Amino acid sequence: MPLVSQVTNVSLAIALLTCTSWTAAQPFPSRAIRIIVPFTAAGGTDILARSLAQKMTESLGQQLIVDNRAGANSIIGTEIVAKSPADGYTLLFTTNIITINPWLHRKLPYNSDTDFAPITLAGSAPTLLAVHPSIPVRTVRELVTLAKSQPGQLSLAAAGSGTPSHLSGEFLKQTANIDLLIVQYKGTGASLADLVGGQVAMAFGSLPGLAPLVKSGKLRAIGVSGAKRSPSLPETPTIMETYPEFDVVIWYGLFAPARTPREITTRLHGEAVKALANEEVAQRLAAQGFDPGGTTPEQFSEIIRRDMKLWQKVISKAKIKVE
């Protein structure tokens, strides 16, 4: 080989090695980060994701862009993240639907157990059990007594098969050993419209969504899920005060694709926790009915494992399948 060609090849090799070393040495993040929210904009998941993204953008010095990819009960957006490069530049912000879908669908295009690296539980919100004012009950115990006297007659509105409102209703049926007539709707709006109109007796819904209807007298709150009473409805007891096993909340969490380098997930965790601890962010989320999170990845993983077991049991016993 001519000397000139050898020199040229050596120079090219050195240039490539230098370029590769420089790229590898770039600190994370060196460009914008995309957060996939597998739900439509303006919902609770989207609101919390944008609050987190805004504050993390300030601290990381790179923009965090929220990308709503709704559809198929969150499966579409979740699949995008599962199949994205494990480099920290595509993240998932979702709810405990990720622990529910494996038991509803025969086949998913990802594995909820192995395709994601939990970063932190960013927040949670209790669900509220509310009845139409015409229903003569004021507590969960009174509701159970009434349901047992009228098996299969009291109706509960669900926002769709496999949704949190549906599964909360099934869990209450199983926990209290009562027979409720669950009416399926295509979305929360339609189900709440019929609840307010008195066409159905009761529904589970997010506390931020139902609290205004309770305060205006259009609905009556009889129980809050979770371990503690809500500051926005302090007179409403928790369902756990009657049934201690009814520990159900809607949680919101940040994930990276599995096999993302530990140093990257550690950096993202630290920045997310710092953002959630920010007084402005915490006050904004509390005003909307969220409890701020900030768990370690290990704590978040334990919450995920617990929910996986819970919803597998509830869904299996209720024989729910979504095709």
Image (tube, rainbow, N blue to C red):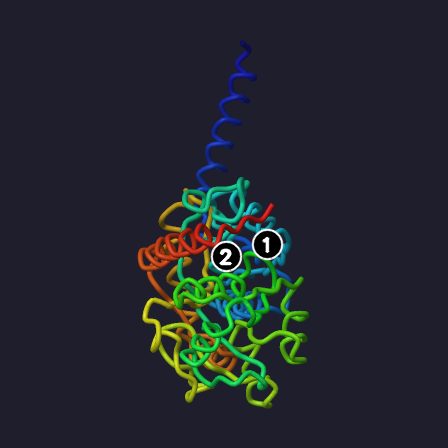
| Secondary element at tag 2 | helix
Task: Tell me how far mark 2 sits from mark 1, CA to CA.
Answer: 8 Å
138 or 265: nearer the viewer: 138
Q: Quadrant of residue 219?
A: bottom right
Residue 148 rendering spot, x and y as whole percentages: 45, 72
Q: Amino acid at mark 2?
A: Ile
Q: Quadrant of residue 194?
A: bottom right
Residue 191 rendering spot, x and y as whole percentages: 64, 70
Residue 268 rendering spot, x and y as whole percentages: 42, 58
Q: Amino acid at mark 1?
A: Asn
Q: Which badge, 2 or 1, comes first in the chain's sequence? A: 1
Residue 97: mark in rendering: 2
Mark 2–mark 1 CB contact (< 8 Å): yes
115 or 227: nearer the viewer: 227
Residue 46 rendering spot, x and y as whole percentages: 58, 66
Look at the picture and state if 158 lies above or below 23: below
Could you tell whether 66 is left or right of 267 in the image? right
Q: Residues within 10 Å of mark 1 (few under 14, many from 20)?
A: some
Q: Residue at x 45, y 65 (%)?
A: 173
Q: Residue furthest top?
A: 1
Residue 73: mark in rendering: 1
| Secondary element at tag 1 | helix
- From this viewpoint, is residue 180 visible? yes
Which quadrant: the C terminus?
top right
Look at the picture and state if 158 lies above or below 119: below
Q: How many marks?
A: 2
Look at the picture and state if 84 lies above or below 204: above
Which quadrant: the N terminus?
top right
